[in-house]
Image: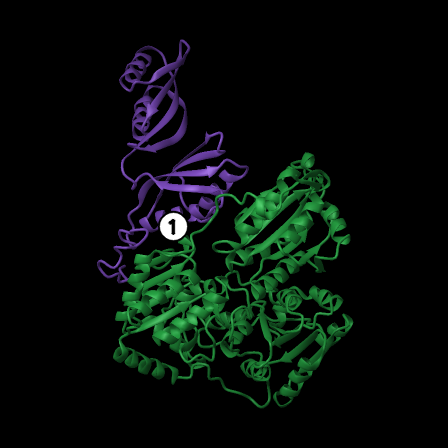
């Protein structure tokens, strides 16, 4: 016999049945019945954010650091439209989210009612799927389906729009086991013949490279484990996108570092010169490929991906394997082992010799200073002082993000949360809140720039209210550093609106919210200041005043291939042609 | 522009069997997409085409399975082989999409379109219009002393040819349904 309950109660019941224990949200008129139900229970914790965008990014941080879907509850109209940036961010980075929005009652839809917006219309292109539920009897079914869609295949954000009358009305509740989750069931196993062919390619490769991405992390911890096993067993070098950092440990002996626009010289050169590229859960993003015409011209390319549309989208792939990374790697390892674990040892040795020559360029070298803190130095010290801690890192977007990827080492998956595809300034602070909620005892640091951080600074209220000891490590150069860098390289050093005027006193700002503020401008005092930050049990804003005009290197200039990297200031004269200038 | 340097034969097992990813040849393909007949599903398909900059030459949609709540969308689109493959993959990602068939490559298929033509005129032109309509097996579905409405069914090419003939004979209005297509055989 089915249980009857109101739509609002159903939302809470379905969340419980889906194992959800945290919701990030902000109340409003069209979700009041659901908030009333949340008030009357203790199983699900509600984190009240200060802006709906913050709720979605916090849920992203929660999802990425746990592997579980993040849940958001916001009201209709502005509540829903404020969530759009977060939804788009989650779609680009394949983060599983289930977002609930209130809607005006069904009989008012289309009348331009108060706080009415066409939420399913607006969010159709920025969700994996969305639903407007008009009948309470269908609500629980749709919620269970939403969790299924968000977490199956290539994960992504989904949205359920619930009119207020549907929340009030009674209907039959369907438990998850009886729910109709539809026909959506992406194939997990890869084609055996193709996987065998990949084993052939591995046996015969002379200059191979693993190019891994966020798909490895999304596939779950087992996939990262299998990847490590495969890398160790073959002895092949491995590089990763920004999204995939941590799947293979930074301390691993085959690690080349991140690749791409601000990736390491050895990683990009190896990508360019390889004869076998094995792309695993990576989608040949334009930050990775540089000029596609000259992308790794002499390699055979194999790609493992669960999303058919990621294959042959920008780069032609010779051996595509459609399937879940974990499942395919398991089969690949089995086949490769059963055939005697063969690789071309001599050729590989030569290849590693070449890679060591590239490594010898020491592409991350920078000129340090005793007078001002260099951002790279700040991150090196942060790394040294936190490396052994149970540590999670989030970032905002810009130079500091790339330096964090270059100078911090990630030993495990789900430890680095950053906005990769969409490049959302304002992501890192709320994301750090979501991570801290999921891991209350862990050290959570948001590496930020002052401009990005200000975009969602209102979440300081959230951190203070819930006593979340997030550390905001702000590399403050009083500039939009990456914009400034591009203006220097591309726009004749005309720094149009790329400096931060009227910055707040970050120490006082922290104190105004009951948090701790620390300012540091002296390299000699940096370690003590960082330790002070780490030892404070509560949220900290660390205002690290750094060199204002530091550029982020190495860099593949827009419109250039992998083997034409800029290694430092001396390389920057007239490097970007008119064709490159139109690229972002 | 051959910069991808794809080795001959290395693509033979590609899931998408690309002929030549660098070809600038624009091909026309007819796709049949079976979808759940639910609110917004057409908007999802159209939004995909507009959002990613793909072309729609013709689009028809109607429920084909009432019990299963399934609709069939027939889309005629154009693009390079790589773009066509990408369109199919992107369509396949839409959650309510059950099947995507490329009728242009999956063996022989039949395509039909229905069109209504209003032709107004008197005297010789009117007689000529009627005579040509007979040749094209178009039916007269409305008539006044100065006008006909013809109903014609056929391939898009046949309908185009009929339109060209009617133009000098007083064509004033056309309504076309877009293409419906099925693969041949069982």
Looking at the image, residue A220 lies above or below residue A365: above
When asked about the image quadrant of residue A229, the answer is: bottom left
In the image: residue A480, left or right of residue A553: right
Mark 1 secondary-structure assignment: helix
Residue A13 in the image, given as x and y percentages of width and height: 68, 49
Looking at the image, residue A470 lies above or below residue A182: below
In the image: residue A43, left or right of residue B93: right
When asked about the image quadrant of residue A570, the answer is: bottom left
Kindly identify which residue carries mark 1: B86
Viewer can see residue A347? yes
Residue B13 in the image, given as x and y percentages of width and height: 28, 55
Residue A352 in the image, given as x and y percentages of width and height: 33, 80
Parent chain of label 1: B
Which residue is at a point 58% across and 79% down the rendered structure image?
Answer: A548
From the image, state the color of chain B. Answer: purple
Foreground: B72 or A315? B72
Q: Quadrant of the N terminus of chain B?
A: bottom left
Q: Quadrant of the C terminus of chain B?
A: top left
Viewer can see residue A299? no
Residue that lies at the very extreme toward the left in this rendered image: B8
Foreground: A455 or A338? A338
From the image, state the color of chain A. Answer: green
């Amino acid at each position: 016999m089915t249980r009857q309950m109101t739509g609002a109660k159903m939302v809470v019941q379905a969340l419980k049945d889906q194992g959800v224990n945290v919701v990030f949200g902000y109340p409003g008129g069209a979700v009041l019945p659901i908030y009333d139900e949340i008030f009357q229970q203790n199983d699900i914790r509600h984190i009240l954010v200060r802006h709906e965008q913050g709720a979605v990014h916090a849920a992203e941080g929660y999802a990425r650091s746990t592997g579980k879907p993040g849940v958001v509850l916001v009201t209709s109209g502005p509540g829903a439209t404020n969530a759009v940036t977060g939804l788009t961010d989650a779609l680009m980075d394949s983060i599983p989210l289930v977002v609930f929005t209130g809607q005006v009652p069904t009989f008012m839809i289309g009348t331009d009612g108060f706080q009415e917006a066409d939420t399913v219309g607006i969010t159709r292109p920025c969700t994996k799927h969305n639903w407007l539920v008009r009948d309470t009897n269908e609500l629980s079914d749709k919620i269970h389906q939403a969790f299924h869609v968000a977490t199956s295949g290539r994960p992504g954000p989904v949205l359920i729009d619930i009119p207020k009358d549907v929340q009030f009305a009674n209907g039959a509740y369907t438990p998850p086991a009886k729910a109709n989750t539809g026909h959506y069931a992406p194939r997990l196993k890869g084609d055996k013949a193709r996987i065998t062919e990949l084993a052939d390619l591995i046996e015969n490769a002379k200059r191979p490279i693993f190019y891994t991405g966020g798909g490895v992390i999304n596939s779950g911890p087992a996939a990262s484990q299998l990847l490590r096993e495969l890398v160790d067993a073959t002895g092949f070098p491995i590089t990763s996108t920004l999204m995939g950092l941590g799947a293979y440990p930074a301390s691993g002996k085959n690690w080349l570092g991140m690749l791409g626009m601000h990736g390491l010289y050895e990683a990009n050169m190896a990508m360019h010169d390889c004869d076998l590229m094995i792309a695993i859960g990576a989608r040949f993003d334009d930050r990775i490929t540089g000029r596609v015409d000259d992308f790794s011209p002499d390699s055979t390319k194999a790609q493992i991906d669960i999303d058919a549309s990621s294959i042959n989208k920008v780069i032609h792939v010779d051996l595509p394997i459609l399937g879940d990374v974990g499942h395919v790697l398991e089969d690949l390892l089995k086949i490769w082992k059963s055939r005697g674990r063969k690789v071309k040892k001599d050729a590989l040795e030569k290849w590693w010799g070449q890679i060591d020559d590239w490594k010898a360029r020491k592409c991350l070298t920078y000129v340090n200073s005793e007078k001002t803190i260099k951002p790279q130095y700040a991150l090196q010290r942060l790394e040294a002082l936190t490396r052994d801690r149970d540590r999670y890192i989030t970032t905002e977007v810009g130079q500091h993000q790339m330096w964090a990827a270059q100078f911090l080492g990630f030993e495990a998956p789900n430890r680095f949360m950053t906005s990769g595809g969409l490049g959302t300034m304002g992501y890192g602070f709320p994301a750090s809140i979501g991570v801290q909620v999921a891991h209350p005892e862990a050290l959570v640091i948001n590496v930020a720039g002052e401009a990005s951080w200000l975009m969602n600074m209102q979440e300081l209220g959230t951190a203070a209210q819930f006593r979340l000891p997030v550390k905001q490590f702000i590399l403050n150069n009083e500039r939009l550093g990456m914009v400034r860098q591009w203006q220097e390289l591309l726009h004749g050093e005309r720094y149009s609106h790329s400096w931060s005027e009227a910055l707040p006193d970050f120490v006082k700002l922290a104190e105004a919210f009951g948090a701790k503020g620390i300012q540091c401008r002296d390299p000699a005092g940096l370690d003590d200041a960082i330790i002070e930050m780490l030892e404070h049990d509560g949220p900290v804003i660390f205002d690290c005043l750094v060199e204002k005009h530091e550029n982020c290197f190495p860099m593949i200039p827009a419109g250039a291939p992998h083997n034409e990297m800029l290694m430092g200031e001396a390389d920057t004269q007239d490097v970007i042609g008119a064709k490159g200038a139109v690229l972002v | 522009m051959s910069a991808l340097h794809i080795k001959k034969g290395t693509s033979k097992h590609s899931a998408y069997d690309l002929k030549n990813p660098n070809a600038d040849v624009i091909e026309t393909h007819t796709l049949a997409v079976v979808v759940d007949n639910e609110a917004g599903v057409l908007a999802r398909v159209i939004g995909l085409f507009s959002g990613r900059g793909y072309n729609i030459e013709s689009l028809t949609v109607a429920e084909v399975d009432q019990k299963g709540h399934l609709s069939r969308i027939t889309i005629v689109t154009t693009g390079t082989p790589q773009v066509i493959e990408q369109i199919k993959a992107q369509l396949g990602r839409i959650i309510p999409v059950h099947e995507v068939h490329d009728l242009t490559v999956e063996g022989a298929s039949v395509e039909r379109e229905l069109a209504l033509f209003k032709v107004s005129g008197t005297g010789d032109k009117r007689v000529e219009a009627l005579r040509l309509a007979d040749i094209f097996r178009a039916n007269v579905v409305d008539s006044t002393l100065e006008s006909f409405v013809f109903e014609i069914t056929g391939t898009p090419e046949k309908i185009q040819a009929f339109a060209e003939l009617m133009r000098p004979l007083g064509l004033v209005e056309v309504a076309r349904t877009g293409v419906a297509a099925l693969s041949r055989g069982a």
